Amino acid sequence: MQFTEQAKSYGYKVVLHSCGAIERTIPALIDAGVDGLHPLQALAKGMDADTLSRKYGDALVWIGGVDTQRLLPFGTPDEVRAEERRLKKLFGPRFVVSPSHEALLPNVSVDNLLAMAETARED
């Protein structure tokens, strides 16, 4: 809590990076003043977008969620677009389009990367 209070005393927002299944700690993070969570690791237990949206709604900014384990490397561009649109609808303006991990690995096709980038620019 000291770190979030210090950041906020300077007018900063606080974004926490934590991979994996951290759903049960999210209430404590919100109470501590965390403003955003990165990444939204789509396939980790309890970290699916539907659950997080239902339980925590507008309490955080959600960064990530475009699955890098199955969707981006093995899906089609149309599947990438559909999932990203679903995430944007669930979280609304409190969603930052980003892969569910920090980086895209070489197994992600250029077509899927472009589909993600183009869909991110849609209203």
Image (spheres, rainbow, N blue to C red):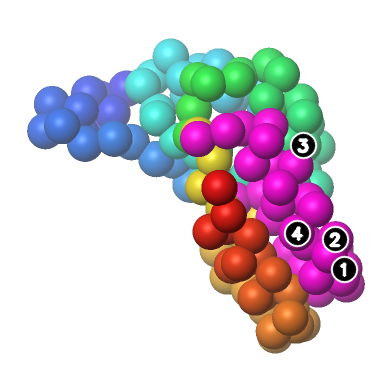
| Relative to 39, residue 57 above or below | above
Identify the residue at the far front of this view: 123
Give the residue at mark 2: 79
Q: Earlier in the sequence, mark 4 or mark 1?
A: 1
Tell me whether circle 2 and circle 4 mark residues in contact (CB < 8 Å): yes
Give the residue at mark 1: 75
Q: Which image quarter holds the N terminus?
A: top left
Give the residue at mark 4: 81
Q: Earlier in the sequence, mark 3 or mark 1?
A: 3
Q: Residue at x 84, y 65 (%)?
A: 78
Q: Residue at x 76, y 25 (%)?
A: 51
- How far apart in space, not on screen, are marks 4 and 1 (Cα)? 10 Å
SS at badge 3: loop
Q: Residue at x 69, y 84 (%)?
A: 110
Quick one: label 2, few (<14), some, or many (20+) residues within 10 Å?
A: some
**Residue 66 part of the magenta segment:** yes
Tell me whether circle 4 and circle 1 mark residues in contact (CB < 8 Å): no
Q: Residue 56 falls in which quadrant of the image?
A: top right
Q: Give x and y (percent) for residue 13.
A: 29, 35
Tell me whether circle 2 and circle 1 mark residues in contact (CB < 8 Å): yes
Quick one: label 4, few (<14), some, or many (20+) residues within 10 Å?
A: many
- How far apart in space, not on screen, are marks 3 and 1 (Cα)? 18 Å
Give the residue at mark 3: 48
60 on left or right of 103? left
Q: Give x and y (percent) for residue 109.
A: 75, 83
Instruction: Specify the segment rendered in magenta.
Output: 64-93
